[in-house]
Image (tube, rainbow, N blue to C red):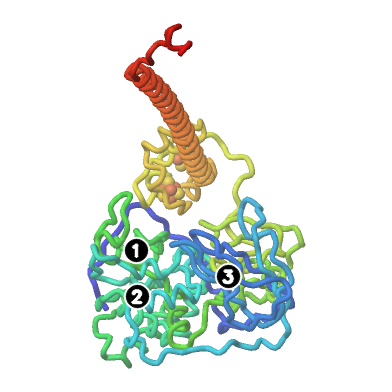
Amino acid sequence: MTQKLGSFPGGLKLNGQKKRSTQVAIRKMPLSKKLILPLQQHIGEASIPIVSVGDKVLKGQKIAKAEGHVSVALHAPSSGTIIAIDEQPIPHPSGLSALCISIETDGEDQWIKRQPIKDFTEHTEHEIRQLIRDAGIVGLGGAGFPSFIKLNPGVHHHVETLIINGVECEPYITCDDMIMRERAEGILDGIEIMCYALHVKNCVIAIEDNKPEAISALELALGARPHLKETNVVVIPTRYPTGSEKQLIQVVTGKQVPTGGLPIDIGIVSHNVGTTYAIARSIKHGEPLISRIVTVTGREVEHAGNFETLFGTPMHELLEFCGTKRQPEEPFILGGPMMGYNLSGDHLPVTKTANCIIVGVDDGAKASTPLPCIRCGECATACPVSLLPQQLYWHSRAKDLDKAKEYNLFDCIECGCCSYVCPSEIPLVHYFRFAKTEIMNQQQEHAKADIARIRHENRLARLELEQQEKELRQQQRKAALAATQAAKVKQAAELPTEPQTTDSQETQ
Ligand code: SF4
Ligand code: SF4
């Protein structure tokens, strides 16, 4: 469809490096003997285990329930036995460990009884959202935000447009491209469900013009569903970071999400294509989210491609399956080269947000020692949010966090464009992530200190009240005692005087 498109400032034309992983169809990663499932695979509160060590579980069985409002359930990706619920290393730049459920698979891969829904319109929108939550579905574009929340606009918002994000603008990553090429029907099923849940008819499937096969597949599938006449494929120019939510909205609609606001504030909701497909599987087939497509690519990968991988599969098995020439401790990138991060322990599990593993980036070598800033301004020109990365860098580096906030640090989407163009090869975005973490830690510390201060003040007030009550009781007791004594005195005074005996009476 030809549509007038908007634009955003800055951005980059990058070498896509996508051909290597799109030469063959999506393959299935073989079942691992052991699956390790972190309870925190999404933004929000971690799920709570509902199984114990020694329990037998079936494929798709719920093993952890959602806890709190921003949380989703977790399911067994295959049948087997729970062998541990303990801390395990997780794929995180900090190298942290976190609580995980480990399953020893039995090789049977036996499903629970699935409950597909033939006609989702027989359920209310609320029920559909709950089913999606219960299926453990989160944003598969990399963010991991629980999808059911983005399907609930609330009573104060009206959704005008649903945008399905098939942009995948970061180099090397091709899992969305491949899912659009191969599973277009499922994506349209997901769109129908989401349009129903959101009460919206107008839907845009946004795809960059470097994915002609995906564009054709979706247009073909749409042609066979005339009732989706308000759903259109919109082809947009390839430019990084168009796939970021706010930039995509700007390109597709020409509207800007206000600073500190959400897309829903301007009547827009967006979901990733992989998420859309997962929603269709959960509702139409009764399958919870237990796997995802992972791109494995890079110079050191012999059989690069896209692999349907069960969550919890150790990354080293996936890398071995793809024939990497990597040494055991050699770092690799999880995510893309712009927004991803380096990991070195490859016994880490594949999680819901693991969209891509790169071993050997062709063009990403950066100087190990950055040079001083030469104030060239290239970083500001490249920034898609119109920030001043050079100033942000100075303030973040000097730990002048208030100044960094004044320069809108929290509007930074961590796209890495500024670092990429910096001739001094300063890892700017690392400074911004560090400064954001520092500020959030400070805010948490302030919040803790406020809670402690309020508790202390409450305790003092309680002690003072207790003292006042004690004094009042003492006064009351004293008053009561005084009153009793006064009464006694009064009573004594009112008694008739006894007649005095006389000597004459005594002798009678
Ligand atoms: S691009 Fe690098 S060298 Fe140029 S102003 Fe920005 S931080 Fe300084
Ligand atoms: S990382 Fe932040 S400051 Fe740098 S270009 Fe992206 S949005 Fe701008």
Mark 2 → mark 3, Cα distance in angstroms = 21 Å
Q: Which residue is mark 2?
A: 126
Q: Which mark is residue 64?
A: 3
Q: Could you say where residue 145 lies in the image, as x and y percent from the top left? A: 45, 63
Indicate the quadrant where residue 76 lies.
bottom right
Q: Amino acid at mark 1?
A: Leu
Q: Which residue is mark 1?
A: 248
Q: Is residue 85 above or below residue 229?
A: above
Residue type, mark 3 in image: Ala
Give the side of residue 497 with respect to residue 330, left or right: left
Quick check: 83 left or right of 180?
A: right
Q: Outermost residue toward the top?
A: 503
Residue 430 seen in the figure: yes
- Which mark sits nearer the N-terminus, 3 or 1? 3
What residue is drawn where x is 24% and y is 81%? 230
Quadrant containing the C terminus is top left
